[in-house]
Amino acid sequence: MTRTGKFLLLLAASTSLAGVAGAQQTPSAPVASSQAPVSFTADSVSYDKTGNIVTASGHVRAIQNGQTLYADEVTLDRTTGEVTASGHVALSQPGGDTVYANHAVLERGMKDAVMRGVAARLGDNARLIANGGERYNGQVDELAKVVYSACDLCKTNPRAAPTWQIKADSATRDLQHHMIEFRGARMEFEGVPVFYLPYMTQPDPSVKRQSGFLIPGIGATSRLGAFVSLPYYWVLGPSSDLTLTPIIASKQGPALRAEYRRAFNDGALNITASGGQDRGHLGDAVFAQGTFDLNQDWRAGFQYNRASSALYLDDFTILPNASFLTSNAYLEGFSPGAYARLDAETFQGLVASVDQARLPIVLPYGQYHFVSAQDSLGGQFSVDASVFNVFRKVGTNTVRAAVVPGYAVPFMLPDGITGTARVQLIAASYEAGKLYQQPNYGRFGSASTGRVQPYGAVMLRWPWVRSAGHLGTQLIEPEVQLVASPNVGIRQNIRIPNEDSLDLEFSDANLFDLNRYPGIDRLEGGERVDYALHAAWYLPSGASVDGMLGQSYRFHKDHNYLPGSGLTDNVSDIVGHLIVTPAPWLSLSYRTRLSHTDLGARMIDGTASVGTHLLTVTGGYLYTNTDPYVLYDTASPTGQITLNPPAGYFTPRHEFTAGVTTNFGPWSFSAGTQRNLQTGRFDNANFSAGWQNNCFGVNLIYSQRFTSFNLDTGNTLVLVQFNFKTLGNVGFSAL
């Protein structure tokens, strides 16, 4: 009996449609019932009562247990339970995965199948094609003459070979454990075989986490010699995993690296540990960090970093060129307008230039910051509080407790003048020992003291704004600030340790700060006037020019400032900036500090960037007349750094940097260098080139360091890395 037209038919058949070729099945999915009814829609359905056969033809769609089968024709033998589908066969799982075949014969409730012309679209655009295959128990597909790739086919020539593909004599697809095993596999690049593997495994790309071996790494370095690494990724549970990487090398090792990760409902933990033979000794390193949310306002965390030596980190490229490591534990809290933190820090020196005995142990270090909402006058109250204990085996030991309350309120004057009135109080107490050692190099052994320093300031701005029509908006803004505070005599600083104010750089960024030191261990006092002229031009196209020149006048000289700082006289050096952005493809920035006596440059910081995504050129220039970093570990002949800093302090910093990047089509290139103009030598140079399409990428990285690190003579790194989509990375490095 045959009926034409669109048909819907329900059959209580002893079969299941859960086993069509290549269908993906997750372990958590409900088991398909072989007795579940099958619903068909088709252009026509015929019944052969003699053979007990049902045939559906034309746009057939069959649904059972949430699975949908599409075909040109489906034949169901109700006696044997065999289902035959032919012509554009497709099976869609409830999760959306679809597999295709030219012809499929299914038995045992659709759990066993014989397929012809199999194709499956996997995750990340991967495709699996086979001449034919068999399915067993709805869980394992045995495929013959397999092709696997994650590359798109050429639109103009679909028959052309993709960028890369794996051809295998046979493959097993484990639908339950989401693994694909290839036998007799050949990797082809642009249709050309590049290597052969008798056996390889690959997690199903739809699975984000799957235990198994990862792509091995190979290479050669001057420190390790020839080496190979074979990572194994181990899924420990739904929220944790472990990667074990043995490293075999010709000069050093063997070594083993383990990376453990675990996510909690309220935090995360990451631990990387490694160990192995290095230069005749056992080397090791541990890097661990964790964060844990205690509630919506508080969280705790830690960071633990330790290594046997810098040589071990360099040899195995774990953390090259590290001179010290930091470990800490902390507790911090957040609330509207407030932040609190309590932590402890330790440091490990790794190189000869860093003496472990001189490194500080900070235990504890507490901080509190608060800014109130605006009051009825528009003002805001703020407070910063801190307490710390700094201990050194060799060097100054310091205990400090400080509180810095303040209040600022804005106001308006006639003619559009805007103002801000500020008051601030800095109060701190100190207990210090071994002041004669680094980083203070004073003349006393110990001190117990404190001080309170009030500040008051009024800031006035008079913005003149003019609309220039199609030329945009122009701004001229005089700025002036009056600051009043008691004088800070040089004797007041002699017994106060300096932990946070060694590096002072006077610039346009801190011209209007109440205290221009970066911390509160050194303070400036007295009365002064800060003044500047700010001008800007904003064009409708987005182009702009912004510039400022400023200076400070102090009514009494402050002898606490270091020579060359620009603040030792009544009149300060001139500071300013000029930022020009004439077009989206051009940006120029210039910051400077000029001597107030002869306008000679004492600081220059200039950067330039020209170009678009296609080609960008950058450059930078830095000059400072002093090097404040030597103050940390160099004693002054007089024991008082402020009066007579060491000779190295007057060595200028003089550097130039340049870089270029370009991108066109799938290609990208970049290069850069840094040159120390003071010594006339290059510090470093680097170059990289890359090519990438939708499924493959290759990168070449070259980097060379010319400066000495830990008594070496420089370093050169060459790295070639290949990235195959869904397969992973493989690289070759030379160091």
Image (spheres, rainbow, N blue to C red):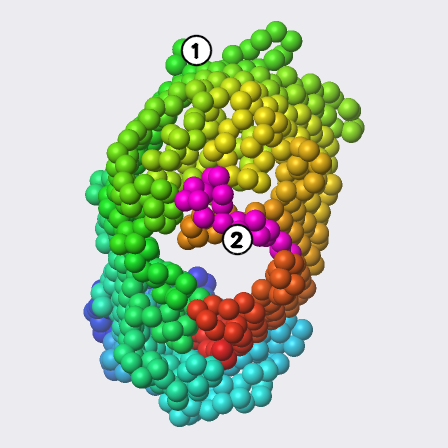
Q: Which label was assigned to residue 131? A: none
Residue 308 seen in render: yes
Looking at the rendered structure, the secondary structure element under dot 2 is: helix
- Residue type beneath disc 2: Gly
Circle 1 SS class: loop
Residue visible at 48% across and 21% down in the picture: 526
Q: In which quarter of the image is residue 499?
A: top left
Queried whether the magenta region covers residue 652, the answer comes back as yes
Q: Name the residue under label 2.
A: 648
Q: Is residue 709 left or right of residue 427?
A: right
Residue 70 in the image: state x and y as whole percent.
Answer: 42, 69
Question: In terms of depth relative to the viewer, which is nearer, 489 or 702?
Answer: 489
Residue 262, given in percent of the width and then of the height, sits at 25, 60
Q: Measured from the top left, where is residue 677 in percent x and y?
A: 65, 58
Residue type at the position of mark 1: Leu
Q: Residue furthest front?
A: 638
Depth check: give the residue in front, 44 or 69: 69
